[in-house]
Amino acid sequence: GDSVTQMEGPVTLSEEAFLTINCTYTATGYPSLFWYVQYPGEGLQLLLKATKADDKGSNKGFEATYRKETTSFHLEKGSVQVSDSAVYFCAFNYNFNKFYFGSGTKLNVKP
Amino acid sequence: SQTIHQWPATLVQPVGSPLSLECTVEGTSNPNLYWYRQAAGRGLQLLFYSVGIGQISSEVPQNLSASRPQDRQFILSSKKLLLSDSGFYLCAWTGGNGDTQYFGPGTRLTVL
């Protein structure tokens, strides 16, 4: 069935390190892909999205490229900051009603 | 611009008591509305979604129910809370094209 698989956390990095959080999806349709970020005690915020193959979503230094051939949407950032510490969720949608979310990856960035 | 409100922000309730959580959206019409639950340190579990007034789809059978009495109002209810109902409840909406989902600030429910 439809699902999202993202790497288990927590991921612990030092400030200015390179970040990759892997995400793959299984969908019977042709989905739009999303990354959301959740800071402690808050709701989810849209970080970036891509709606078709080879599109690159980007925001606040984060990037992810829609790879249809590998059904992946990995999140990357070249230099993380302490303020990036949060939980990151990969998600997709293709039928306008239901969204499918991964289980979330907690990122801890140490100074 | 669109905004989404949830209240209360936090709630502590005894086992067996009733529950009512409210979500309202401003700045849009005929949104799709969603209720999710997030257990501590866990991912999102879709509970209910609604594509219009009075139209509710249930994803997980449990002692919770949802209602949509107005276009931009979505209510989550229970007649008798269980300990397992504790969690962080998130309301979300999507617009007419259904492409992107936007979340409210959440309600932290603790059942004792």
Image (spheres, coloured by chain):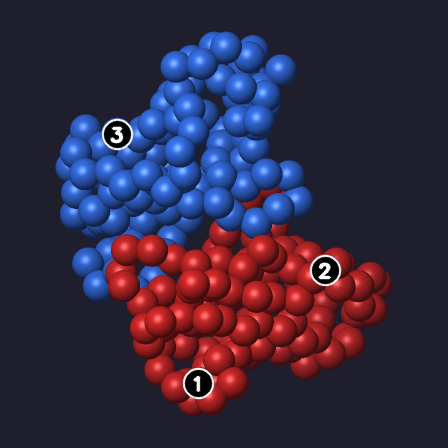
Chain colours: A red, B blue
Residue B33 visible in rendering: yes
Residue A5 location (% of width, % of height): 57, 66
Same subunit under labels 3 and 2? no
Secondary element at tag 2? loop
| Chain bearing mark 1 | A
Q: Residues within 10 Å of mark 1 (few under 14, many from 20)?
A: some
Q: CA distance from mark 1 to mark 2?
A: 25 Å
Element assignment for label 1: loop
Q: Is residue A48 visible?
A: no
The amino acid type of the residue labelled 3 equals Ser
Residue furthest out toward the front: A1
Residue tagged 3? B67
Label 2: few (<14), some or many (≥20) within 10 Å? Answer: some
Q: Quadrant of residue B70?
A: top left
Give the mark, 1 or 2, whose residue is nearer the N terminus. Answer: 2
The part of the image, by quadrant, that contains residue A99 is bottom left
Point out the image quarter for the C terminus of chain A.
Answer: bottom right
Vertical placement of B61 versus A58: above or below?
A: above
In front: label 1 or label 2:
1
Asked whether disc 1 touches disc 3, contact meaning CB atoms under 8 Å apart, the reply is no
Residue at 25% x, 49% y: name it: B32
For the residues marked 3 and 2, what is the alpha-carbon distance in whole angstroms? Answer: 36 Å
Return the residue at label 1: A68
Q: Residue at x 41, y 38 (%)?
A: B60
* Pointer 2 chain: A
**Three-letter code, disc 2:** Gly
User: At which x and y percent is residue A70?
Assistant: 51, 85
Mark identifier at residue B1: none
* Residue A9: image tag: 2
